[in-house]
Amino acid sequence: MTNITDLRSSLEAFRKAGTIDTSIYANLTSKLKAAEIEFESVEKEALVYKENLDKLLAEKLVLEREKSSLAAQVIKLSNEKAELESRISTLQKSRPVLSSSNLVSSFASSLAEMDKGLKKVQSGSKYLVSNMNVTLKTNIALEEGELRFQLPKADDIISPENLSTIEFSLRASPEKPGIDSYVEVPGLVWLSKEEAESKLLESGFKVGNVLEIESSKPQGTVLAQLPSEGSLAEPGADVDLTVSRFLSVKVPDLVGLGIEAAKVLLEKSRLLLEGVKEQPSDKDPGTVLAQSLGPGSEVEANSAIVLTVSTKVYKVPNLLGLELESAKKVIEKSGLQPGGVNEQPSSGKSGVVLTQSPKPGLEVEANSKVDIVVSTEEKEVVPEKPLRPIPETIVKETIPKVTLNTSSKLQPETTTKVSRETSVGASAGTPGQDYKLVPGVTGMSLEKAVALLGAQEIKVGTISEAASTATGGTVISQNPGAGSMVNLSVPVNLTVSKKAPETQLRSSTLSRIKL
């Protein structure tokens, strides 16, 4: 940035010294500004990359520490595993093994004996043992594909941590009712979950397992049932239901990603990209600047999201003072398109840009058109001489001597006229010649006045300017005057208004203009 500042200072010095003209200075300044912006953009990107690198290094350090900790835990667990395997091997050699079938049958026999014993009791109340919950502490072994148990002896002193806990239930199998007692399962599909549960209870059934799956149907709608509608089932049987639910997803953070990467992430997150808005930014084109759904928020699956992405910033270059061809090249190089080219008379060099639209420095879209106005040489209108001599009157307007005082102010009503000689035809024409009445054009714009005189086949003579309070370009006087009879070869001279200069003249030094 120091070098760019030095360059700007050098350019300013060259401009003040007159080594380079204004157009070159403006062009170089514009290029220097673009280089400065690009340099700042590169600095910002480098800073982001550095921050990301530091973050990755910190994460790497944390992972390495976790890896070391996990490795130590693996070694510890491996040692514990080897110790347990050794102890289990010792227990397997010194303990008898009981198969799972023998274990369960032993408890089943105990359950049957208890039930039989209760039936022998002569009492008013009758008891029934229908199930038994068993919890065992034992060693488990797998031999020849069968699960076996090693039960400790009564006099063994074994830590509970070294034994496995087994829990299971035994229950008597009730006699199944006959087919005559079965009832028909009601239809539950497309009902709400609450309505289905109520209907099952009314029909003598119970709600079994309820499975929720993603569906476009309303939340909690029954999509399927098992047993199906019309099936026969015993009273009190379970009926499993499958109901719909909306799957909620977490909105990812897309800001800073490229648009293509954001699309891939949205697809994986089960969200729909509804639209993409563009916004000029100094970020890389296509970078996500904002998102309509907040990052981290919980929304329904397939929810719509709108992204705002960056577009390249196109600034209108400064074309003032450049020649037409150079201006067009600068416009195209800036990513814009040349627009309309209009001409305006000027006392300076022709083909130089005088004004432009849009103004320099404005941010516009790519390929926007830039309209310019270039200078042309002023053309002096010389009145034609009459074809035939006619009576004429020479009217001379003399400019009185005016003393300029830059410290004084110009009176707004003062008008200075250019000295000229105008030949005006006599009011009465010579027989045999073409004469016409001159129309009044005072107060009209110059374009309308010229068009009206042309329609009357009357020529326009000298067009001069004079300071006036009237709008610029308005005809403030004509010679010959309105209603004069002139020959068609005699032109009509016009005086149009212009803005008064900032420097004003003392009224005491002005004298009346004598005709």
Image (spheres, rainbow, N blue to C red):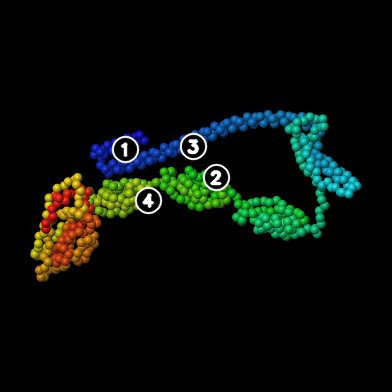
| Label 4: which secondary element | loop
Q: Which mark is residue 8?
A: 1
Whole-percent x, y for residue 455 in the image: 21, 66
Mark 1 element type: helix
Q: Nearer the viewer, residue 333 or 344?
A: 344
Residue for badge 2: 296
Going from the N terminus, do you reach mark 2 or mark 4 first? 2
Q: Can you name the residue that lies furthest to the front here?
A: 508
Of badges 2 and 4, nearer the viewer stands 2
| Residue found 26% across the figure and 37% down from its top | 14
Left or right, residue 33 beside residue 442: right
Give the CA separation, mark 2 to mark 1: 47 Å
Find disc 4 in the rendering and name its residue.
367
Pick out the residue farthest to the bottom. 431
| Disc 3: CA contacts within 10 A as few (<14), some (14-19) or many (>=20) | few
Regarding mark 2 in the picture, which secondary structure is present there?
A: loop
- 374 relative to 477 in the view: left or right: right
Q: Is residue 223 above or below residue 67?
A: below
Q: Earlier in the sequence, mark 4 or mark 1?
A: 1
Q: Earlier along the polypeptide chain: callout 3 or callout 2?
A: 3
Give the percent coordinates (x, y) of residue 201. 73, 56
Foreground mark, 2 or 1, reads: 2
Does residue 268 appear in the picture of this structure?
no
Q: Position of residue 293 (x, y in %)?
A: 52, 48
Three-letter amino acid code at disc 2?
Answer: Gly
Q: Nearer the viewer, mark 3 or mark 2?
A: 2
Camera-side residue of 416 and 324: 416
- Chain-order first, disc 4 or disc 3: 3
Give the residue at x 20% y 50%: 410
